[in-house]
Image (tube, grey):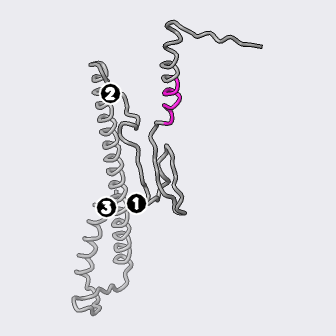
C-alpha cells in the first residue's frame, strides 16, 4: 500500500510554524511566573512561586522574583479613578478621626471612673475619721518624731472640721 503525501501549499500551511511557536509560548507562560529559590535547613534546594517559610535565614534565599515578574496592581488611568482615590482617602481619614474620638471618649470615661473611686475612698476615710472623733475615746496622733501624743479637745475639733470639709467635697 502506497500512501501519497501531498505537499501543502498556500497561506495556512506557511503560517503553521508561527502558530505552533505562539502556542508553545502560551503554554510556557505559567512557568514564567515569579520564582523563589532557597536552601532548606536540611540543605535541599527548593523552588516555588511562594516565598520561603517564615524563619528561613536571608543567606539561605538564593533567588527572589524580579519586580517585573511580580504582579503589579493596575494603575488608575482616568480622572474618575483619581476622584475615587480621593474619596477613599477622605473616608479613611474620617474613619481614623472617628477611632481617635472613640479612644478619647474611652480615656475620659476611664478617668471619670478613677476619679469616682478616689472620691469614694476619700469619703469613706473622712467618715471613719469623724466616727472615731465622735466616739468619745481618747485619740492619739503620731508627732513629728514618731512619738504618739493624745489630742486635746481643740485639736479634736480641728480634726473634726477637716474631716467634715473632706466629706462635703467628696461625699455627695
Residue under label 3: 170
Query: Which is more toward the observer, 109 or 166?
Result: 109
Q: Is 7 on the left or on the right of 35, as rendered?
A: right
Residue at image coords 32%, 59% = 115
Q: Residue furthest right?
A: 1
Residue at mark 3 to residue at mark 2: CA–CA distance: 63 Å
The mark lying in front, picked from 1 and 3, is 1
Q: Secondary structure at mark 3?
A: helix
Query: Which is more toward the observer, 114 or 105?
Result: 105
Residue under label 1: 59
Q: Is residue 7 above or below residue 117?
A: above
Q: Secondary structure at mark 2?
A: loop
Q: Is residue 70 above or below residue 83?
A: below
Q: Position of residue 130 (x, y in %)?
A: 34, 72
Residue under label 2: 75
Q: Which portion, as a residue range, is magenta?
A: 23-31
- Asked if residue 28 lies in the magenta stretch, the reply is yes
Residue at mark 1 to residue at mark 3: CA–CA distance: 66 Å
Q: Main secondary structure of the magenta part?
A: helix
Residue at image coords 48%, 52% = 52
Tag 3–tag 2 contact (CB < 8 Å): no
Q: Is 166 on the left or on the right of 65, as rendered?
A: left
Amino acid at each position: 500500500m502506497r500512501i501519497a503525501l501531498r505537499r501543502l501549499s498556500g497561506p495556512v500551511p506557511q503560517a503553521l510554524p508561527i502558530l505552533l511557536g505562539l502556542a508553545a509560548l502560551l503554554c510556557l507562560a505559567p512557568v514564567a511566573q515569579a520564582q523563589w529559590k532557597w536552601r532548606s535547613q536540611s540543605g535541599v534546594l527548593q523552588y516555588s512561586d511562594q516565598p520561603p517559610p517564615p524563619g528561613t535565614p536571608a543567606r539561605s534565599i538564593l533567588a527572589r522574583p524580579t519586580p517585573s515578574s511580580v504582579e503589579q496592581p493596575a494603575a488608575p488611568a482616568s480622572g474618575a479613578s483619581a476622584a475615587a482615590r480621593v474619596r477613599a482617602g477622605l473616608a479613611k481619614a474620617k474613619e481614623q478621626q472617628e477611632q481617635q474620638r472613640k479612644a478619647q471618649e474611652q480615656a475620659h470615661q476611664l478617668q471619670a471612673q478613677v476619679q469616682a473611686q478616689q472620691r469614694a475612698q476619700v469619703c469613706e476615710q473622712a467618715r471613719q475619721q469623724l466616727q472615731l472623733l465622735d466616739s468619745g475615746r481618747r485619740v492619739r496622733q503620731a508627732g513629728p518624731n514618731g512619738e504618739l501624743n493624745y489630742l486635746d479637745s481643740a485639736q479634736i475639733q480641728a480634726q473634726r472640721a477637716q474631716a467634715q470639709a473632706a466629706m462635703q467635697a467628696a461625699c455627695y
